[in-house]
Image (cartoon, helix red, strand yellow):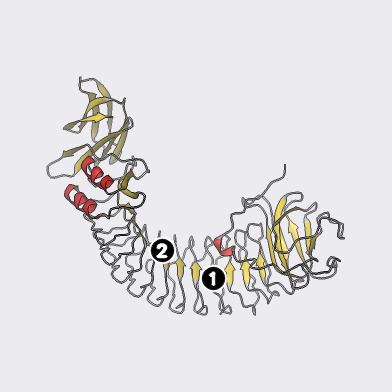
Amino acid sequence: MKRKPLFSALVILSGFFGSVHPASAQKVPAPVDGERIIMELSEADVECTIKIEAEDGYANDIWADLNGNGKYDSGERLDSGEFRDVEFRQTKAIVYGKMAKFLFRGSSAGDYGATFIDISNCTGLTAFDCFANLLTELDLSKANGLTFVNCGKNQLTKLDLPANADIETLNCSKNKITSLNLSTYTKLKELYVGDNGLTALDLSANTLLEELVYSNNEVTTINLSANTNLKSLYCINNKMTGLDVAANKELKILHCNNNQLTALNLSANTKLTTLSFFNNELTNIDLSDNTALEWLFCNGNKLTKLDVSANANLIALQCSNNQLTALDLSKTPKLTTLNCYSNRIKDTAMRALIESLPTITEGEGRFVPYNDDEGGEEENVCTTEHVEMAKAKNWKVLTSWGEPFPGITALISIEGESEYSVYAQDGILYLSGMEQGLPVQVYTVGGSMMYSSVASGSAMEIQLPRGAAYVVRIGSHAIKTAMP
């Protein structure tokens, strides 16, 4: 059976074939001793994808030697600007003709593809795309006309790029590259180097850079002072303890999640619309200068306060897994999404939070105040009354798993300690706020034991028959609740 590769192309590739030249009057295909691209495939008779764009006047010339007989046969012509799924009957694959742009894809799962590609005989090439193949090396040193290179998702350990090319877009993500010299590529505007083994990245010569993605590497620090045109920055999952974006005043999108940042100064970044720094170590953040901000994701830090009074354009806020005790949203009239579970927002503060929520006039808002993960921690108090208040403003109230949250039906207050919260829904009793090792029992109101165990973490889920009332004992404290 033919194996068909899955092509979910990156957004950066959408402009790879911007226009298609009209077919010329020539009917004779390109000669075998002329311009050509030679490939070695991991195996024959598997379905790959080709897309080419011919040089002006040669749109009717391009063909692929699918049967390996060294001559053009019917059905081997490639239409300029069109994706085509092809099968080469031999592992040596050759495409003939004067091409301006060339794309070849193997299996997106990495099962098969090109192990070698030679483009040195194709002198007019301006765009080259070999994403999702099995290349361990790639020599582009003679392709001085290239402005677009996508060699992502291969097995490359280094890149041999043309020294004199005016490359504007380079994607070498998802390889095994540990170092990259970009000093001669002064016209570079888009750089994608994520999912490699980079420990450093020198961008001092790339002053025109507008989009930079170096997520999933091992970079500890980066100097972006020369990149004053930068609009989008993705540096997720590195080892960064600091990030200076003071020189990047054009920045609109910043994603620096999963690092070790303890501070982030954004006072110069007044054009920011999207900010995501979750899973870092920040204790505070000043957003007073970021008035254009629409999307804010700061979950998993150590924030004790969050002031969004200057962020009137805010649409979505995720601030779960922090140490917040209050949240005022009265100055965010456009807000439609709020995730604030796993904080320390108690009864009165939760009421004030909900009172500050805007009333949704179209559709429903999404409000997630409670973590129902059995291994998660939750110190928020959101009662059934609070839930009804939010619903009255057209907010859909959900748990962290996206299930409807009815609100805490019972609280056990422990003098000098925090509160144990209890709520029941769909045959499951949810308990949180406990200490590990604390005994937990559930009885019917008639005294029959339904459950007995000890808490393995701060939260538990207990499955019980529905339509009955129960007495829940946590340590030496007990309370009655009903299972709807």
Query: Residue 58: which quarter of the image?
Result: bottom right
Q: Is residue 8 above or below residue 248?
A: above
Side of 386 where 73 appears, left or right = right
Q: Residue at x 28, y 39 (%)?
A: 406
The label number, if any, that marks residue 190 in the structure image: 1
Say what amino acid the circle numbered 2 marks.
Cys
Residue visible at 22% across and 36% down?
A: 409
Q: Which mark is residue 295?
A: none
Quadrant (top left/top right/bottom left/bottom right) for the C terminus: top left
Q: Secondary structure at mark 2?
A: loop
Q: Is residue 277 above or below residue 123?
A: above
Residue 6 vertical placement versus 331 (above, below): above
Mark nearer the N terminus (1 vs 2): 1
Q: Image quadrant for the N terminus?
A: top right
Q: As drawn, is 113 to the left or to the right of 32?
A: left
Could you tell me if the residues under marks 1 and 2 are in contact, i.e. CB atoms within 8 Å? no
The picture places residue 167, in percent across and down from the top left corner, at: 61, 75
> Is 332 positioned to the left or the right of 116 in the image?
left
**SS class of the residue under badge 1?**
strand
Q: Which residue is mark 2?
A: 256
